Amino acid sequence: MRELGEIHRQLLRKLADGRLHSGVNLAGQLGVSRSGIWNAVRDLQTLGLEINALPGTGYRLDRPLELLEATAIEAQLAPHTRCLLQSLHIHDVLDSTNTFLMQAAREGLASGAVCLAETQTKGRGRLGRSWQSPFAGNVYLSVLWYFANTSLLSGLSLAAGTVLIRLLRQLGAPGVGLKWPNDILWNEHKLGGILVEVSGEMHGRCAVVVGIGLNCNIPHSYMAAVDQASVDLRRIPGVAAVSRNALVAGILNELLPVLAEFERKGFGGYREEWRRYHTFDGRAVTLDLGGQQIHGLIVDVTESGALLVDCDVGGRREFVSGDVRLRVAKP
Ligand code: BTN
């Protein structure tokens, strides 16, 4: 299914409170037959929504949902963010919010466009991985920005990670930190990630899409499908229930100014703060370079966002890409 129909959306709004709704009442309120309601419920179930159908009684979502609303997001934007936000595109179902903006950039969409989806059918992570995107469970957000050339982009994804941690700590998650380059971790579990994609000339104007996936409320059924230990905001002790619309506004309030200032400030403007959030600083790690594995101790991150490692073999080296894993000490 590409987008929800009007009946599906209205039905979802009714069910979003997590209470029991009788089929007769829903049919009357939405102006369709009871079998129309049943068909719409089945369509929503194919999107992964866990709607219990209680025979002769009605329908109930297994948990309340908060749908994304442009007005709720816009109401919580800082005045400066409102100036930077060019357009807000909210979709029920997309293949990937990054893919949507990359395509739209080719068609001339302006800098400062933001895309959100309730679910992604082909959500993408770093290094060719897929990104699980349960409906209305998490935040899937991408921002399009143009830069004068690609050489100005080093460390941009790290700067984005820095301000995300700043926001999450303000929300009451003090233990949230970063794994190079920009994994959002809590207690060594993945809470979110950032995928930056670039299209354009090496020495000409380029379109950059910064995509953020942040786990808020992952259904149990999805937890098994993710390929690494994951966590969501709901499961972190001390984090108050967060509205997804408020979270999106908070992310935009932090991220859009970074994009607007990055050509001038570079990663240097965020490096000190990034270091404070770096959970694997000084740790023994294995760096997977896609085939080759490097073992060593993490030393630092450079002014351009590269990882500095004291390698077991070959001394101190800088890495600009790769996947970091903690090395488990041999017993
Ligand atoms: C990672 O592997 O850690 C990066 C994950 C990035 C996921 C986000 S969700 C919104 C945007 N759209 C995508 O397809 N990917 C990014």
Image: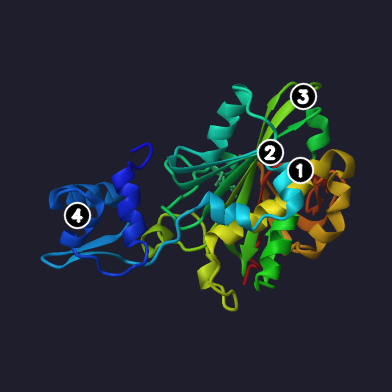
Determine whether label 2 and label 4 are within 8 Å by CB. Answer: no
Q: Look at mark 4 in the image and give the residue it sits on.
A: 27
Q: Look at mark 2 in the image and give the residue it sits on.
A: 112
Q: Residue furthest bottom?
A: 238
User: Quick one: quadrant of the N terminus?
Assistant: top left
- Residue 123 appears left or right of 148: left
Q: Earlier in the sequence, mark 2 or mark 4?
A: 4
Comparing 114 with 186, the one in front is: 114
Query: What residue is drawn where x is 89% and y is 40%?
Result: 264
On screen, residue 225 above or below 167: above
Point out which mark residue 259 bears: 1
Determine whether label 1 and label 3 are within 8 Å by CB. Answer: no
Q: Look at mark 3 in the image and give the residue it sits on.
A: 205
Q: Amino acid at mark 1?
A: Leu
Q: Amino acid at mark 3?
A: Arg
CA distance for labels 3 and 2: 15 Å
**In this orientation, does residue 274 appear?**
yes
Q: Position of residue 218 (x, y in %)?
A: 45, 61
